[in-house]
Image (spheres, rainbow, N blue to C red):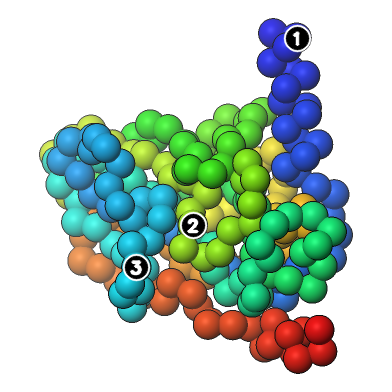
């Protein structure tokens, strides 16, 4: 137990920075969703890394709700400043990209039963962090090495429809119950305090949400300005 606590504190000291000016001007976080009748093995392409080319025209933020099926919900970070830093730390001053995100996930079932939360999982190249408040209220993952661009997901959540219900449910990114924010952690390991929520996910019912594009912007205006004067 003592060893686990020491490892948890070490992870938090590295992956969860103090609030500071970040490296991305206005990053966004959104949700995707993929439905499966059975738990897929191996993990399908697109859950952790977008397949390309071609890039998708919009994020897959809606899935039909089927009885007793699984739903994988990746967390998508976009609108990062370009160029993306090739490493992490001090060399990333003036460059974009991200190394992690702390957040919570809420679910709303306005007309029927909710889905059952199963797990929060880090993607390849990321390490899952501790959760004092419990998942999915407090989810965290951080890069094990390099800075990442929008096409790398830091992780995904798994939900299960435990009934024959097909009514709609919505999923929304909220503040982490542990840290009280949902800020992108940039490649300087500081918070991008201007992080905004770009989109939610919907499972079931008639689709009534809009799915944003995968990059939101190809390159932020501030990123272009920094490149000119670098």
Disc 3 crowd rating (10 Å Cα; few below 14, some 14-19, many 20+) is few
Check the image and report above or below for 138 versus 62: above
Which residue is label 3 attached to?
52
Can residue 219 be seen by looking at this rendering?
Answer: yes
The N terminus: image quadrant: top right
The residue lying at 63 percent from left, 41 percent from top is: 144
Mark 3 / mark 2, whichever is N-terminal: 3
Which residue is label 1 attached to?
2
**Residue 65 placement (x, y as % from top left):** 20, 51
User: Cα distance, mark 1 to mark 2?
Assistant: 33 Å
Tell me: 183 left or right of 211: right
Which of the numbered marks, if any, corresponds to residue 152?
2
**Residue 162 placement (x, y as % from top left):** 23, 33
Check the image and report above or below for 145 versus 6: below
Q: Nearer the viewer, mark 3 or mark 2?
A: 3
Tell me: 64 left or right of 203: left
**Residue 153 placement (x, y as % from top left):** 48, 54
Toward which corner of the image does residue 80 lie, by quadrant? bottom right
Q: Secondary structure at mark 3?
A: loop
User: Cα distance, mark 3 to mark 1?
Assistant: 44 Å
Tell me: 171 left or right of 162: right
Q: Secondary structure at mark 1?
A: helix
Mark 1 / mark 2, whichever is N-terminal: 1
């Amino acid at each position: 137990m003592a060893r686990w606590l020491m490892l948890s504190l070490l992870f938090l000291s590295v992956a969860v920075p103090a609030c500071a000016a970040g490296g991305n001007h206005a990053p966004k976080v959104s949700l995707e969703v993929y439905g499966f009748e059975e738990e897929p093995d191996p993990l399908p392409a697109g859950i952790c890394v977008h397949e390309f080319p071609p890039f998708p025209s919009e994020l897959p933020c809606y899935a039909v709700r089927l009885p007793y099926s699984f739903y994988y919900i990746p967390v998508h970070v976009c609108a990062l400043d370009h160029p993306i830093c090739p490493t992490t730390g001090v060399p990333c001053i003036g460059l974009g990209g991200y190394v992690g995100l702390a957040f919570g996930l809420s679910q709303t079932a306005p007309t029927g039963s909710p889905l059952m939360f199963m797990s929060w999982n880090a993607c390849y190249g990321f390490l899952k962090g501790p959760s004092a408040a419990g998942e999915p209220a407090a989810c965290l993952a951080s890069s094990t090495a390099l800075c990442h661009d929008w096409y790398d997901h830091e992780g995904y959540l798994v939900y299960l429809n435990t009934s024959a219900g097909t009514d709609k449910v919505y999923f929304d990114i909220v503040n982490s119950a542990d840290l009280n924010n949902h800020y992108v952690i940039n490649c300087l390991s500081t918070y991008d305090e201007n992080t905004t929520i770009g989109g939610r996910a919907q499972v079931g019912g008639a689709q009534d949400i809009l799915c944003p594009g995968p990059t939101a912007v190809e390159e932020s205006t501030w990123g272009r300005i920094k490149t000119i004067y670098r």
